Image: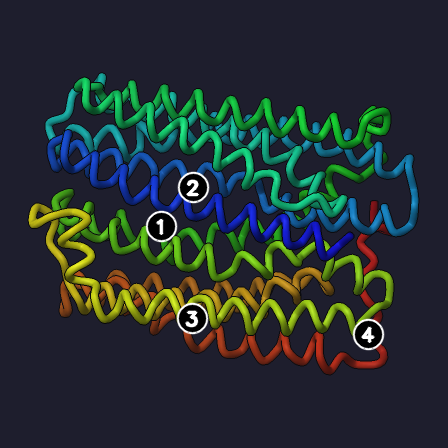
Amino acid sequence: MARKKILFGVGAGIVSLGIDGISSLLILRLLTQYLSVDKAGYWILVTSAGSLLLVLQCGLGPAIARAVATARVANDTDKLRSLLGAVDVAFRFVAGAVAVAAVAIFFCYLWSTAQRAHLTLASAMGWFPYAVGMAANLQGQASIFILNGYGEVGWDKVFRSVFTVLGFVAVWGALMMGASLPTLGLIYLGQNLLFWIAAHWKLRGYLDESARRLPPQAGQVGTLFREGSKLLLLSVLTYLITQFTIFIVEKYFGLTQVAAYSAMLRVGVLIGTVGSLLPQMLYPYTASSWAAGDYARCRRYYVAGLLISVAITLLMVLPLCLFGREIFALWLGAKVPYSAACFAAVLVFYVVYVHHSAHATPALAVEGDAFTIPAIINTAMVMILVFELPRFLGLVGVPLGMVLGTAPVSAYVVWKSWRMIMMPSPIVAPADFGTQL
């Protein structure tokens, strides 16, 4: 049964990523075709800022999945129901944080950027419906995280596939009819509201009577945030290493280069997401097997996720390195400039990223180790390099800084994860997250 669910999750993930990736790439083409370069660049900044809002889930996803999985092993129904109540309370705090952050991002950055590009206030305000859509997406993810803890993986991918297709068709039609940026924001708002409704419906249908919430036990909400805070910091640092570089490109090279760099980064993100899909789908099973003392099964999940994810990534990267120029010319045309060196550096970074994730994700599942200190060091090194190297190397300095700042720290994380899972110390017991709740 577990194998079937894993295969379903991986299959749904592949379909979703294919749809999401193709949609993302085609929308970039539509933006550059139907909007001015400045408007297209501004909308790319909006979507990049929206990714920051998603980080405000505070790393609760793995924490919730791990807590639910551990409570299930203990067959503690009351704890499971109180966990549902704790998740509800936690995501009310998340909603408040998103609202504050959305206002701050607009007035501290987006509005001034729009003014420099001579965009109207109405165009700039397209950010707000988009931001509300991100908040709705997070509320839907709360239900998905609980389902993941029950071993029901992949449903977020199913829903995302359906609503991404609907959203893409709506965006295409709107742009063809001369829609403004606020209209695009409203489309994304509707798309994410539907995701929220579908995820909530699926959770209620799966749990049936056991979906009844109990008030959180003392300290449950705080424990979720404490566990999640490790990943919150990691998510923020990951954002700084990748998505934040779009804002650095805007700072040094203007909105004209934002579309070109964003196109390369989107391809890299798609590769990184596909490559790291299997370890993520295996996460609840890795955590459950380790908690149950089935270490042999846990190690099989670890090694299989590592070998398959890296192999898939290399198979995607090699043809892109060889035919990148032809692919970009066919995709975006001559309007958007292409740099072979910059694209190669982006691809190398995502090979490193997938290899890193394939080790770090199982380590997080079995010991709750988010490698916080290495992540801070990694981010500090990347931030220094991506700000300094472009001064001397131009655009290629941005992804090259990502690679050079990440590789040394990643080597340490890989070594530590391997020892943690494959050669554990006999005096170290598996972390029992459930006893903390």
Percent x, y of residue 83: 79, 36
Label whose residue precedes the other's in the sequence (4 or 1): 1
How far is the residue under mark 2 from the one under mark 4?
36 Å
Percent x, y of residue 81: 84, 32
Helix, strand, or loop for circle 2?
A: helix
How far is the residue under mark 2 from the one under mark 1?
8 Å
How many numbered badges does the structure rendering display?
A: 4
Residue, disc 3: 352
Residue 243 got which mark? 1
Q: Contact (CB < 8 A) between labels 2 and 1?
A: yes
Q: Contact (CB < 8 A) between labels 3 and 4?
A: no
Percent x, y of residue 211: 80, 27
Helix, strand, or loop for circle 1?
A: loop
Label whose residue precedes the other's in the sequence (3 or 1): 1
Q: Contact (CB < 8 A) between labels 3 and 1?
A: no
> Residue at 71% across / 30% down in the picture?
203
Helix, strand, or loop for circle 4?
A: loop
**Crowding near pointer 3: few (<14 within 10 Å), some, many (20+)?**
some
* Disc 3 versus disc 1: nearer the observer: 3
